[in-house]
Image (tube, rainbow, N blue to C red):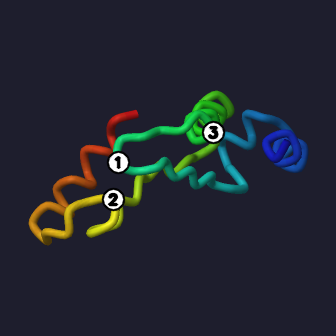
Amino acid sequence: MMVDIASAIRGSAPALVEKPYFVVYAEPISPLIHPETSLAKLILCAECGIPCIYSPAPLAGGLLPSLSQVTPLSDWPRAFLV
């Protein structure tokens, strides 16, 4: 596992939390769907103290209405529903 390798390189798990080597980018399926794999990555990062970017990315006109007034407003609440 990457966390074990990075901990070994850094010297210990607390040292890795202090200065992480990597950041995990986990992107859930929009809108408002959080797959088990995305949540598992998020929980693992939280347990190990690894930084994680958890950002839904709705596409205007695809998974989100294409109105320019709606797009910026509807993206923000989804990012905080974890």
Q: Position of residue 70 (x, y in %)?
A: 13, 61
**The disc labelled 1 sits on which kind of residue?**
Pro
Report the Cα–Cα distance between label 2 and label 1.
7 Å
Query: Where does label 3 land, which residue?
Result: 37
Q: Secondary structure at mark 1?
A: loop
How many callouts does the rendering have?
Answer: 3
- The residue closer to the viewer here, 14 or 35, is 35
Q: Residue 63: which numbered mark, if any? A: 2
x 16%, y 56%: residue: 73
- First in sequence: mark 1 or mark 3? 1
Q: Quadrant of residue 78?
A: top left
x 63%, y 33%: residue: 40
Q: Secondary structure at mark 3?
A: helix
- The residue closer to the viewer here, 21 or 54, is 54
Q: Position of residue 38 (x, y in %)?
A: 58, 41
Question: For this view, does 25 lie left or right of residue 29?
Answer: right
Q: Residue 31: which numbered mark, if any? A: 1
